[in-house]
Amino acid sequence: MSEDEKLLKEAKKLPWEDRLTHKNWKVRNDANLDLAAVCDSISDPKDGRLREFGPFFRKSVADSNAPVQEKALDALIAYLKAADADVGRYAKEVCDAIVAKCLTGRPKTVEKAQMAFMLWLELEAVEAFLDAMEKAIKNKVAKAVVPAIDVMFQALSEFGSKIVPPKRILKMLPELFDHQDQNVRASSKGLTLELCRWIGKDPVKSILFEKMRDTMKKELEAELANVTGSAKPTRKIRSEQDKEPEPEAVSQAVGSSPAEESAADIPQDIDEYELVDPVDIITPLEKSGFWEGVKAAKWSERKDAVAELTKLASTKRIAPGDFTEACRTLKKLITDVNIAVAVEAIQALGNLARGLRTHFSGNSRFLLPVLLEKLKEKKPTMTEALMQTLQAMHTSGCLSFTDIVEDVKTAVKNKVPLVRSQTLNWVTFCIETSNKAAILKVHKEYVPICMECLNDGTPEVRDAAFSALAAIAKMVGMRPLEKSLEKLDDVRKKKLSEMIGTGDPSSVPSSVAVQSSGRSMPSTEASDGSFARRSAASMLSGKKPINTAPAATKKAASGKSGTNKKSDVGQSKVPKPTEQEDIEPSEMSLEEIESRVGSLIQADTITQLKSAVWKERLEAITSFKEQVEALTSLDPSVEILIRLLCVLPGWNEKNVQVQQQLIDIITHIASTASKFPKKCVVLCLLGITERVADIKTRGQAMKCLTTFCEAVGPGFIFERLYKIMKEHKNPKVLSEGLLWMVSAVDDFGISYLKLKDLIEFCKDTGLQSSAAATRNSTIKLIGSLHKFVGPDIKSFLSDVKPALLSALDAEYEKNPFEGASAVPKKTVKVTDSTSTLSAGGADGLPREDISEKITPTLLKGLESSDWKIRLESIESVNKILEEANKRIQPIGTGELFGALRNRLHDSNKNLIMATLSTIGALASAMGQPVEKSSKGILSDILKCLGDNKKNMRECTLSTLDSWLAAAHLDKMVPYVTAALTDAKLGAEGRKDLFDWLSKQLVGLIDFPDAVQLLKPSASAMTDKSADVRKAAETCFSEILRICGQETVTKNLRDIQGSALAIIVERMKSYGGFQAESFESGRSASASIATKSSTKTGKTNGSRHGSKAVPSRTVPTKGSRQEPIMSIQDINIQSQALLNVKDSNKDDRERLVVRRFKFEELRLEQIQDLENDVMRYFREDLHRRLLSTDFKKQVDGIEMLQKALPSMGRELIEVLDILLKWFVLRICESNTSCLLKVLEFLPELLDMFRNESYVMTEAEAAIFIPCLVEKSGHNIEKVREKMRELMKQIVHTYSAAKTFPYILEGLRSRNNRTRIECADLVGFLLDNHGAEISGQLKSLQIVASLTSERDGDTRKAALNTLATGFKILGDDIWRYVGKLTEAQRSMLDDRFKWKAREMEKRKEGRPGEARAALRRSVRDSGSDPAEQSGEVSRSITVPIFNRENYGHPEVHTDRLPMTQTYSGVGPTDWNESLDIITYGSPEQSVEGMKVICHELAQATADPDGSAMDDVVKDADRLVSCLANKVAKTFDFSLTGASSRSCKYVLNTLMQTFQNKRLAHAVKQSTLDSLITELLLWLLDERVPQMDDGSQLLRALNVLMLKILDNADRTSSFAVLINLLRPLDPSRWPAPAINESLVIRNQKFSDLVVKCLIKLTKVLQNTIHDVDLDRILQSIHIYLQELGMDEIRKRAGADDKPLRMVKTVLHELVKLRGTAIKGHLSMVPIDMQPQPIILAYIDLNLQTLAAARMLTPSGPAGQTHWSDSTANNPAPTAQSADAQLKQELAAIFKKIGDKQTCSIGLYELYRITQLYPQVDIFSQLQNASDAFRTYIRDGLAQMEKNAAAGRTPSSVPLSTPPPAALNLSPNPLSPVNANTLNDSRNLNARAEPTNFSLPPSYAEHDQGFNVISPRVSSYSQSALQHNLDDSRNERLPSGVSNGTLDAIRERMKSIQLGSSAVNPDPRNRPLIQVNGNVNNHPVPEVHGAGNRVQGGILPMDEKALSGLQARMERLKSGSFDSL
C-alpha cells in the first residue's frame, strides 16, 4: 500500500471537519467526494447529518486547491439537493465564500458556483443570495462580475420576480452601466432587458434611464424593441415544487374551461409603485411656505402654494404621514371663490391619492362628499379635474364600494342634475375598473340607486343610470339582477339589453383571448437534473428574442459563440453580434482633418485645393487621385480622406471637371477599401445625390452610389435616400434618384431592401409628384420590382389612380415576373445587418399582423346562432384580408382557424362555401406558415368533398388549389391519404380528389412522398365505382412515374389481395418488372390474408379510431424480400447505428406538451415520429422498428440492447424519439413486444445512472403518463414489470416530479391502474416522504377511493393511507379532506390496526419518528449564530485598549469583570443593564433583548408610568450602551459574528427614536456616544467585518436620529467641543497607513457635517436651544485657538473654524442685536475682550448693511462701548429715515381690517417713545377720514393705557418698555435725536407699576426685540464692577453698593441699545479674516409662526441676561473662564 493510500485510509477515521481542513489536498479532495456521496444518499431533508455538515462549506468552497474546490462545490450541490429551507441559516456565509473565491476560477468551477446559487434560491435563501451579489458586482476583477450578473439573470429568468425581488437588482444596475469592462456592460444590459420582461419596459425606463449615459440609453432603447411578450417562471422553489398540477388536475375533473386553466399561468404585472422608494413630502412642504401661502389674500399666492403641493405630490410614491391638516386646508380651498385655486387643490388631492394609495383612504372618505358636491360646476377644467381625482381615489384603492354607498346615495339626490349624472358616471367607471368579486358583494346596494335614477327627469341622469346598470350586468351577469329588472318596462329592458350587447367587446369574451394565449405558450419547467448556464448578454441583439422563458441550453445561450453552426444548416445566415456601428458622423474642423491626414497627402496638394483658380484645383485633385491610388492600405485612412474631400474641394465645387475627379476618388476608395464605414456614406450621400441631378456628373455619381451599395448594402442607401429625395427642392434629384434606384434593383435584387418602405415611398412621393419625369421614373422602378416580386405587388397599389394603373400594367408587361430565375448581377461585400429578408419570405413583400383585428366580437359572430351574423363575420374576415393587401402574418390566427373550422360543418351550405373561399384566401395571404397555424383544418376541408353537390366540391378543390399554392404538396399528403381511406367521402368525392392529385403530380419529377399515396390508390383500383377506379389508375401511373419501379416494389408489402394483383399487372405493362419475384409470395399472401387483415385492423383501428396509421413495411411470409433485406443489412453494417449529427433535441422538446394526463398519439404525431426514426436511426434498424410485424420490432429492440453499452450518449440524444416509439408499442399491447420493451427499459435507466443523466421534463411528459395509464395491464407479469419500472423511475428521476403523474393515474377509468397508483403513493410515502411532503394534500384523492365499489380499490387506498398514518400520525387527518362517516370509520379501523401492528413489530407509535425529528430541530435551533460555530468563546486576541471617557455614572468596581451569567437570561430592567455593562458581548445580547422589549412597551403607552420610569434611567442606559459599542465592535473584529454590534445599535436606535428619552440623555453621555459612533464610522476595519456594510449604514442612520431627537443645545455643545483635535488614545486602533493629523481631519469633517445638519434647521429650532450655552461653547473654542491661530487658519480655509463662524453667523442673523442678551455665560469684561464679541460685531455690521437682520430694535446698535462717550454726535438722518420706514409699515397695518388694532397700538407706543415727532405730517396725502380714524384710535389707546388695559397678541416691532424693577427710577424711552439727551431723558417717564402683558412677554421670547440684554456695555464701569465682584466673592455675596452701581449702568446700557448707527470709523473693531457666511439660512418670516409654534410665554419676572449675571455675582457662583 502506497503512502498516499495509507494517508487516505487513516484520514477516513478523522472527524469530518478535520478531514475537510487537512493540510494534504488529497485528503481534502477525498473528504469532499465522500461528503457528496453521503449527501446523495440522504433522502430525508430533516436528517440530522445535514445540520452537522452545514458549517463545513464556508471553508471548503474557499479551498486554495482548484480541483478540491471543485469537489467541494459538488458536495455543496449534493447537500443542497438533499436539504430543505432549514439550511438557509448557512446561506450567507457560504454565498459570500463562493463570491470571494469561486467566481474567478475555472469555467467549470464558475458553472458549479452558479448552480449552487440557484439551489440556494430554490431553498428560499434569496436575501443571502442578493447580499452576496451586491458584493460580487463590486469585485475589481471584471471576470468575476460577469458570472454574478449572469446568475442574477438566470435566477430572475427561471424563478421570476415573485421569488427574486427586482427592487434590489434595480439598485445594483446603475453602477454596472458605467463599468469599464464592455462584457460587464453588455451583461448588465441583458439583465435590464430581462427585468423588462418581468416588470415591463416603462417601470425600468422611469427608474433606470435617468441614471444612464445617453449612449447607453440609445443602445438599450434599440434592444428593448426585441423584448416581446411576457415572462413566466420556469422553476419553483423547493416548497412549491409540483404544487401547481394539483389544482390543475382538480379543475380538469370538475370540468373547467381551458381559459380558466391558462388564466392562472398569466404572470401578474408588477406594480411600479412597489419598486420605487417612498419620498417624504411633509418636510419640504413645511419649508416651502405652504401654510402661509394658502392663507394669503391674493389668489395667485394661494394657487402657487397649492401648486407647490401638487408638484411635491406628483412623485410616484409618497411616504405615509399625517396629511390631515393639509386635507382640511385643501377642503376649504376646493370651495375657493377663484376657480384656478379650486382646480389646483383638486389636482393636488388626486396626486396625493395616487402617491399614498391606501394610506390616503381616511382622508379620501372625509373629502368625498365635498368633491361630489363640487360636480355641480360646469367649467370643463373643473369637471375634468374632479373626475380625474375621483377616479384616482378609486383606482389607487383609497375608496372601496362599501365606503362610498352613503355618499353616492346622497349625491344622486342632489338638486343639481349635473351632480347626479356625473356621480353615476363615476360609479360606472368604478364598476368597470373593479373585479367581479367586489361587485358581487355590493351590487345589491347600487342596483336600487340606479333603478331609482332611471325615473329621473333629466335625460343625462337616466343615461348615466343605464350605463351603471349595464356595467354591473356585464360584470356579474344578468342572473343576480333579474328580480330587480322585473320592474322595468319593455322599452327600458330593450335599451338595457342593447347597451349590454354593444358594450366593450373585450370585457365579455375575455376567456377566449386568454385561452388563445394559454395555448400558444405551453408552460415549460427547468429540469433539476441538469443545469443550463445562461448568459445575460444573450438577451442582446443578434439573439433570438425571448417570448417566454424556456430553459435554454448552453448552445443557445452562449453569449460569445454567436450562433450555433449546427443549427445554421438550411437556415439564413445570421451575422455574429457585433458592436453597433456608429452611423452619424461627428463634427470635425478642417485644421483637425489636416493634422490627422498627416503625410498621406502632400501639403502642397491640400494647399492647391484651397486655391481660387480652378486649374490649380483641377491639378491638385488629379494629384490627389494619383496619391490615393498609390496607397497600399486604404482601410485606416478611409474616413479621414473622405472627410477631407467633403471639405476640400467639397460639394460646393463649381467646376465640373473637379467634381468628376472628386466623385471618381470617392468611388475608388469605396471600391478598394475592405470596409467602408457607413458614416462616410452619410458624409457623401447628399452631395452625390445632387450630382446625380446634374447631367454632366450623373454617370460618375450613379456609379459611386452603386459602389456604395456594394460596400454597405443597398438597404442602407435606399433608407437614407428616401428622406433626401423627399425633402430636396430640386425635382431632378427625385426623378434621377428614382432612375438610379431602378438600376440598383436590377443589379442587387430585392433581398436587401425593405419593400414596404420602398413601395410606400413610391406611392406617397413618386406617384404623387406633379412632375411627369418623376412619375415615369417611379413607374419604371415599380416595374423592375415586379420582375422580382411578381403580381402580388399589384395588391399594394390598388388605390392608385386609374391612369397610373394602366401605365403600371404596361410596365409590368415589359418586366414580366421571373421568380427564382431573376438573379442579382452584383453582390454586397459586407452583409448589412439591418437589411435581411423581411417577414414576407422570399419575395420580400411585407405581411401585416392582423391579430388585433381578430377581436372576440368577430370570433363570437362566427359562432352566432343567426346565419346572417355568421355570414357577416366571414365577410369581415375577407375585408380584413383586403385591407392587409392579401398578405398577412400567421400571428394570432389560431383562434380564427378554429372558428372557421366549425363553420365547415355549418348547416347552411352557402356558408360552408363562403368559409371555403375565405380559408383559401387566408392560405394565399399567409403563405407557407398556414400549415402550422391552421391546426389541422385541412382534414375538415377534405371532408367537404363528400358533399353530393358539384359546386360544393368545386369550391373545395379551389380551396385546395389555394392551399397548395401556399404550402407544399408533401405537407398535404398525410391528410389526403387519410381522406381517400375515409368511407364517408363518397365515390364522387374520391374521384374528384384523385383527379386533382393526378393533375398536381403531372408536373412533378422528384417527389418521394408520392409513395404514401400508393396504398389508397391501390385500394381505390378495386372500388365498385368505375369513375373512381379510372381516376385511381391515372393517379397510380403518375406515382409509378415519379417514384420509379424499385421504390414502388419495396412498398407493395402493405397491399394485399386483388389490389396487389391489379398493381402487378399495371407494373408489367409499365415494363421491366420481374413478375416472378411475386409469384411465390402470392399463394402465401392469399392464405394469410384474413389473419393479416384482422391484425392490421386491431392494430390501427382500436387505438386511433378511424384514423389509419401509415406504416412502412409489412413483410409477407415466404416472400423473396427476406434474403434481399438481409443482404442490405449486411451492406450497411459499416454505418453508425444512430446518426445524431443533425439532431436538435431542444427544438423537438420545445414542441412537447407537458401534460400529466395520458393522451394517445395523433396521426400527425405518428407521422412525425416515423420521419424522425427514419432520419436518425440506421436503415436496417428503422425498418425493423417501423415494421408492423412484432417480431421485427423485437429484433429492433435487441439491436438497441446490444448497442446500449457503447452508444449511451447517442441514445440520450434521441431519447425523446425512442420513448415515443415505446409509447406506441405499449399502446398496441402486443405482449411479446411489450415484454421486450419492459426488459429493455430498466437497462436503459441503469445506463442513465452510469452516465449521470436525468430525464428532462419533456421526456418524462412523453413517457410517464403512458406508463402510469397502462400500469393496470390485465397480465400480472406485465403489471409487475411496470411496477418495478415505475419505482426505478422514481429513484432516478425525482419522486416529487413523478408524484403528479401517479396522482393523475388515480383518476383513471381502469380500476387496476388506480390500484397500482395507490400502491405507488404508499411506496412514495414510505420511501420518499420528505420529497413529497409539500404535496400531501393530494392524499384526499387517495381517500376518495375508499368510497369506490370495487373492494380491491378500497383496500389499496386504505393500505396507502395506513402507511401515511404510520409516518404522519394523527396529522394525516389534515390531508384526507372531507369524508363521510362510513369512510372515516373505515380509516379509523385501519389506523388502529396499523398502530397495533407497529406495536407488535416494536416500530414505535405512529408519527413518533417525525415528531421526534421536529423536536430535535426545534430544540437545537435556538440560536443559529451560536450553532454555526462562528463564535468561539475562548478567543483571546489582544485588542487595542482605550480609556473610558465621560461616564461618572458607571462604577467599574461594582461587580467583578469575570462575572458570568447563566443562559437563562435577565428578568428585569436593572439586571439587563448589569449584563450589558459587565457581561461579554454575547451575553449582553440577552440583556438588550429585554431592554428593547421594555422600550417597546413604554413607547406604546407614552403617557403611562412605564415611560416615566424609563426616562429616569435613559441616561444610564445610553451610558452603558455607549461603553458597549467599542467592546462589541472590537469583539466582532476578532472574527466573531456582528450579532452583538447589531443589537447595540438597534437598542440605541430604539432609545433615540423617542424624543423624551433622547432629551433625558446628559451632555457628557452624549459626548461619549457621539464620539464613539463617529470614530467607528471612520474605522477602515468595519467594512471587512461580518455584515460590515449594514453596520456602517446602521451607524449613519443612528447618528442622524441622535441629531434629530437629542437635546439640540447639548448636541451643539458636544459637536463644537469635538471640533478640537481628538486625544489619540480615543481612536479604536493605532494609525497604520495615515498620520494622526489626517485622521483628526477626517473626524473634524464628520463633525462639521453634523453641525451643518443642525445649523440648517436652526431657523425652526432657535427657540428650542439655550443660546447662552451655545455661545459659551463658541467662546471657549475661539479663546482656545487665539487670534494668531484664527488668522493663520482663516488663510488656510480651515473647515472647523469656518463652521463655528457659520453657526455664530446664523445665530446673529436669526436673533439680531438680541443676541447680545444671551452672553450671560461669556465673561464680556475680561481683558483682552473675548474674541466672540468682535465676531458678533462684524456679523451685525455685515447683516445690517445687507438688511438681513431680524427686526430687533429701532436702531441695531452693534458695538460694546458707551455710545454717548464714543459717539457724541451721530447724524440724525438715518434715525429719521428708519422712523419714517416704521411709520409707513404701521400705517399699512392700520389700513388692513385684520391688523388695524395692532397698528394703532404700535402707533400709540411710537408717540410715547418719540413725542417730538409729528405723525400727522406723514399723512399729508391721506384722506380726512383716515386721519380722523387715527386720531380717535390714539385717544382710545391712551384711555386703555391709563386704565391698565392692553390689547392681546400684538406682535410689536417696537414694544413698550418692560416694567422690570431694576432700580427705583424707571428707565426712560430713548429719543432718536441724541443731541438733546438731557432733555429727552426726563421728558416722559413710564409709570413704575407698568406690567408687561403675557402677549408681550411671549413676543419678547420669540424676538427679544428691545431687552435689557441687548445693550452696549460700558467697558470701564462694568469692568470695575466685575473686578469688585471678583475681589469680594465670598459666601456672603456681593455688597449693595456694587449692585447699585450696576443698576445705574443699566440706564446707560438701555440708552445705548437704541442709539443710531454710529460712524463706522469710530468703532473699535477687531479685524478678522474668514468668511462668516458659508451656510446662509433663510430669513424668519413674521411673528405669526412663532406664536403658533408653541413658544411658551415668558414670565413677567424673567431676568434679562444682565440680571442673570447679577444674580450669579450676588451668590458668588460665577466662575471666570
Image: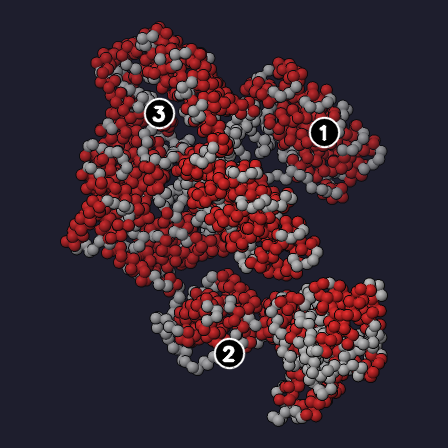
In this view of the protein, which residue sits in the foreground, 865 or 113?
A: 865
Task: Name the element at disc 1.
Answer: helix
The residue that disc 3 covers is 1163
Tell me which numbered mark, 3 or 2, is placed earlier along the sequence.
3
Residue 1385: x %, y % from top left: 19, 47
Disc 3 marks a residue whose amino acid type is Leu
Residue 1274: x %, y % from top left: 20, 32
Task: Name the element at disc 2.
Answer: loop
Query: Can you say which quadrant of the picture contains the C terminus?
Result: bottom right
Q: Label 3 vs label 1: CA separation?
A: 60 Å
Picture quarter containing residue 1564? Answer: bottom right
Image position of 665 with respect to 342: above or below: above
The disc at residue 1447 is 2
Picture quarter containing residue 1275? Answer: top left
Image position of 193 with respect to 1180: above or below: below
Counting other residues with Cα less than 10 Å from the Cα at mark 1, is it few (<14), some (14-19), or many (20 or more)? many
Residue 1931: x %, y % from top left: 60, 93
Residue found 62% across the figure and 89% down from its top? 2011
Tell me which numbered mark, 1 or 2, is placed earlier along the sequence.
1
Left or right of residue 1601: residue 1395: left
